[in-house]
Amino acid sequence: MPKIKPMVARTAEDLAKIMGLPATVAKEWQVRHALLKRLKEIVQREGVTHAQVAARAATSRTRITAILNDDLEHVSTDLLIRVLASLGYRVKVSVTRADTAA
């Protein structure tokens, strides 16, 4: 049996590269994780329950619980923005030219 060499990814870009995915996927991960980080801070600070967040965002409590437990599989950026909006927050998007863009 061939020996499997472990690989270490220190950034989202490294992980995408190891997995054979385009760098754009890494950028999507970074955006979703930034939104998740803020959502978790807001939920904790405001002391709202998962059920209250779910009711405000018109989604299920189990889905909110999964999201707040860092499970972003099958979670769109749109859903995270909708959840934040339901808690009274606005998401601002900034577009700048990357130095590496062609």
Image (cartoon, grey):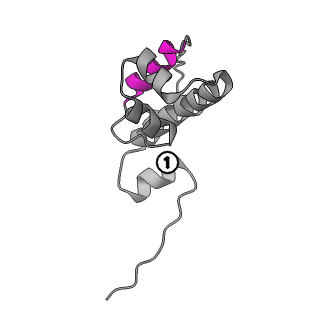
**Magenta extent:** 76-87
Can you say whether 57 is above or below 19 in the image? Answer: above
Mark 1 residue type: Glu
Q: Quadrant of residue 49?
A: top right
Q: Position of residue 41 (x, y in %)?
A: 64, 29
Residue 78 included in the magenta stretch of the image: yes
Instruction: Decide which of 90, 86 is in the foreground and name it.
Output: 86
- Note whether residue 100 is visible: no
Q: Residues within 10 Å of mark 1 (few under 14, many from 20)?
A: some
Q: Position of residue 9 (x, y in %)?
A: 53, 58
Q: Position of residue 43 (x, y in %)?
A: 59, 26
- Note whether residue 3 is visible: yes
Examine the residues drawn in magenta and state their main secondary structure.
Answer: helix
Find disc 1 in the rendering and name its residue. Answer: 13
Instruction: Decide which of 46, 96 is in the foreground and name it.
Output: 46
**Element carrying mark 1:** helix
Residue at 49% across, 48% down: 13
Q: The N terminus appears in which quarter of the rendering?
A: bottom left
Q: The C terminus appears in which quarter of the rendering?
A: top left
